[in-house]
Image (cartoon, rainbow, N blue to C red):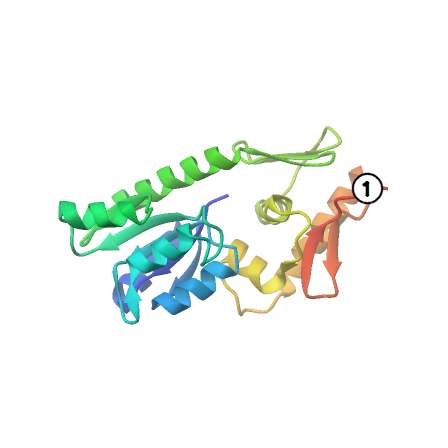
Amino acid sequence: MCAHLLIVEDDETVSEFLIDNLRADGHAVTTAACASEAVAALRRGTVEIALVDVSLPDGSGLDVARMIRGGEAGPPDVGVIMVSGRGTEQDRVRAFERGVDDYVVKPFSYPELLLRTSALEARIRGRVGTVLTVGPLMIDLAARSATLGGVLLRLPSKEYELLAVLARDPQKVHMKEDLMERIWGYRNAGTRTLDSHASRLRRRLMVVSDEPWVINNWSVGYSLRTVIQ
């Protein structure tokens, strides 16, 4: 499952280029054209890696990085790649002092940016571990496999990704719009696709366990049943 990326970039040409290519390479992508939009997106808690331009209309990308690390803009462990047209040693040092993970200078090579993003994703997932355990449910993120009570679950890609997202924070009610953004890359496209995938995933899990693992919470979001009677 590729990381959910946030592109913080006010240049529409650059932003659209990254959206098209990163989505084609399997990433869910959210965009922000300024610092305030970036902070709002980060606070929704679905972003794993932010690609942040230094120069933004309402401030500096360095301030966004500082807010991330300080816990003011979502989880403090979000990966940050700073993107800038300035690449002096002083510029890089200032960025790393703010806690960024990597620094890319414009104009950049897309294959290089993709490799740097993938390397950061691997480091992040190595920090949080590669196996999620919720009771008898185990998800191996590295192997993209899931078992329930020792039984291997054969899940289509999107159902596996939905299960993995829910298992990362099983007690949280994940809003439908956030799940659509995280898994499909679109926030305001309706939730019928999500609902059908969640329904099929629930049925597959109930073949192995009679418990309704995937819970629809008041029709606004989904969570996992974490206390099995």
**Whole-percent x and y of residue 151?**
73, 30
Q: Measuring 66% from the left and 37% from the top, which residue is drawn there?
A: 154
Question: Which residue is at a point 72% across and 55% down the rendered structure image?
Answer: 199
User: Is any atom of residue 109 visible in this view?
Assistant: no
| Up/down of 39 relative to 69, above or below | below
The correct choice, above or below, for 88 with respect to 8 in the image is: above
Please tell me which residue lies in front, 160 or 59.
59
Image point (48%, 37%), residue name = 125
Which residue matches tag 1? Answer: 228
Residue 204 seen in render: yes
- Measured as percent of width and height from the top left, residue 101 is found at 33, 43
Residue ID at (15%, 48%): 90
Taking the image as shown, residue 15 lies to the left or right of residue 225, namely left
* 119 with respect to 166 (left or right): left
Residue at the far left in the pictured view = 88
Q: Is residue 96 left or right of residue 47?
A: left
Would you identify the image quadrant in which residue 174 lies? bottom right
Number of labelled discs?
Answer: 1
Percent x, y for residue 109?
A: 22, 48
30 left or right of 81 in image:
right
- Mark 1 crowd level (few <14, some 14–19, many ≥20, 10 Å Cα): few
In the image, what residue type sits under mark 1? Ile
Q: Position of residue 111 (x, y in %)?
A: 27, 44
Quarter of the image with the C terminus is: top right
> Which is more toward the observer, 13 or 24?
13
Q: Image height check: is 41 above or below 139?
A: below
